[in-house]
Image (cartoon, helix red, strand yellow):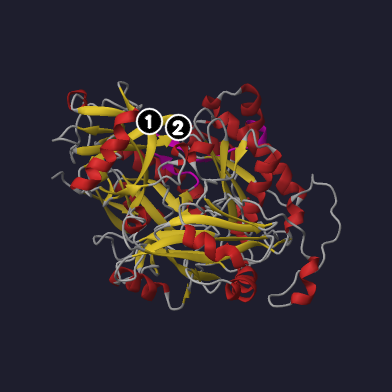
Amino acid sequence: MAAKQLVDVDGREVALSNLDKVLYPGNGFTKARIIDYYIRVAPWLLPHYAGRPVTLHRFPDGVKAQAFYEKDAPKHTPDWVTTTDVPRQKGGKPIRYICIDNLPTLVWCANIASLEFHLFLHRAGQLDRPDAVVFDLDPGEGATLATCAEVAFPLKSLLEANGLQCFPKVSGSKGLQIYVPVNSEITYGRTRSFAQAVANELARQSPQLVVAEMAKNLRHGKVFVDWSQNSDFKTTVGVYSLRAKSDEPFVSMPVTWEELAGLRNARDAAKLRFSPEGALKRVESQGDLFAPLLTLKQKLPEKLRDFEPKAPARPKAAPRRQSGDHKKLDALPKARAEFVEPMLLLRTERLPEQASWLYELKLDGYRAIAARTKGAFHLWSRNENDFGTRYPTIAAALSALPTETVVDGEIVALDEAGKPSFNALQNYGSSRTELVYYLFDVPILMGHDLRDLPLEQRRAHLENSVLPLLREPIRASPTLEGSLTELIRAVKEQGLEGLVAKRRDSRYEAGQRSGAWQKMRVNEGQEFVIGGYTLGGSTFDALVFGYYDGPRLIYVARTRNGFTPALREQLMRKFRPIETAKCPFANLPEKRSGRWGQGLTAAKMQECRWLKPVLVGQFEFREWTPDDHLRHSKFVALRDDKRVKDVVREKVER
């Protein structure tokens, strides 16, 4: 072990070690130079970090080796380092975050190879009071930092039209972040809804350039305006932090709008990539361009229409009806009872726990939209395929649905214990399976559009005006009472899939994954595209599968788990007509099999038979490995309700 060197930093004794260790191999940037940078930039950095919980991104063996995020302060943290406890959503011992309040703490963090610092928008002890709104401009494949600059200017205009100043910084990687200081009494719910509305408006104004949804397959050539950073559990890389995205260090640095205009016009991103030395020269000459974030107080506009300065004037809206007030139903806009794209759920590992959210079970079935119009009854899958002939008992029960009405729910098969079972749903028709259609929303009721009403009002309509008319097997999806910790414990004990959280005031955002509805799995799992199999016996040994990243199908794993002999025969009958000589995966062959043995090398590919990528399967797994494979994966069932190109790697909000 290298000898430690004790140094005095502002009256604190800090132990430094391995100072000659190269952490950025591209230019031989050592730990000593990293510590030196943070010491010299501290006068501008510390005011933005003080009193704010920070997640450390540590690279003990350099940027090319394995790294990890550290939220809990390490056991060897000196007692003079300020920490703050933050409750865990899942219960248990709180997370003890470090606060970088002073130079000794900053130097100590740099010495343990914390190259990047990721900050919350709130300060310690003020968990629901953000100081600012942030928009993270993330370029998709085919877009660049210059594209982000192009998007930044309409964003700036939109904010200024609402009386708000904003300040840009480059992320130090490929993106751009725009900050709107608030510095007043406000909640994350308010800043998040504001940011989402702004992002949606930008996407409406410039659909060829901007996307406000998180799915990566929608981002090709566009910029994702990530509004979801405005959450009490999300962090953003701190100003003046180093980045570890390449062989050489670059800094997350404030820039001027004039510089962004130059980038937009010249499209030369190199001018806005700041080395540590370049960053220091800049702050020494220009000062802290982010200083207004510390003191500038601004008020967010109250109404959604204020976010649409370019839209034509609208007539004054009639007053909204309160739940149960049937005398005012005609004030709602008219709508036809036709297929409505279902509102989608954002996957997260941590559901919000506040009174403004309600909870439901995550049902392991098929999402289904039902409608009655002009005497005709329809039952559709989420991609508008006909479910009526497949599930005739449910279709028959819909005959009492009010005319010109659309409802949203989940078709579920119950096992012998009365629990949802996707396998049982797959085998419906070959066994005595109990089907239930659980309803949880009514976007259109008797020719009136309810999508702009709060969720609680729509639920009241569903329970008072729709469900009393229907019979089994149609039921209400129950809402759950209790603390989130209690609900998670109950879900685990009963072997259920997970939980759903929905904002009580959420609109029905058809086809959108806004984050107003969120889902959390107890067990990891998602859909993947089946692209081949390995040989074994009379059928196959393992399935080979992956997901789409833009137009490219990316291999992630193979599994031999989850199959019965009968299921193997059934799958082989589907495989034979779609066999192909061409491997469909863009990232194969891989150079090595990897630590967990999931890599597909050229030699291993000789054992594979390839399939046209037209089949989607549901898979469970333990976790993602550092080399982007899956551990302990298991096949659950085929999914014919999902489009192949919609199968992307699910981003889990943390």
In the image, is residue 459 part of the stretch drawn in magenta? Answer: no
In the image, is residue 245 part of the stretch drawn in magenta? Answer: yes
The reply, left or right, for residue 58 in relation to residue 209 is left
Looking at the picture, tell me which residue is in the foreground, 440 or 406.
Answer: 406
**For mark 1, does the 10 Å Cα neighbourhood hold few (<14), some (14 to 19), or many (20 or more) residues?**
some
> Residue 602: which quarter of the image?
top left
What residue is at 49 percent from the left and 52 percent from the top?
Answer: 389
Name the residue carrying label 2: 275
Dot 1 lies on which element? loop
> Residue 642: which quarter of the image?
top left
Dot 2 lies on which element? loop
Name the residue carrying label 1: 248
- Residue 175 location in percent, x, y? 52, 37
Would residue 244 be visible to someone looking at this image?
no
What residue is at 64 percent from the left and 28 percent from the top?
Answer: 264
Q: Is residue 27 above or below residue 56?
A: above
Q: Is residue 47 above or below residue 578?
A: below
Q: Where is the C terminus found, in terms of image quarters?
A: bottom left
Tag 1: residue type?
Glu
1 or 2: mark nearer the eye: 1
Tag 2: residue type?
Ser
3D distance between C-alphas at marks 1 and 2: 8 Å
Mark 1 in CB contact with mark 2 (< 8 angstroms): yes
Looking at the picture, tell me which residue is in the foreground, 47 or 337.
Answer: 337
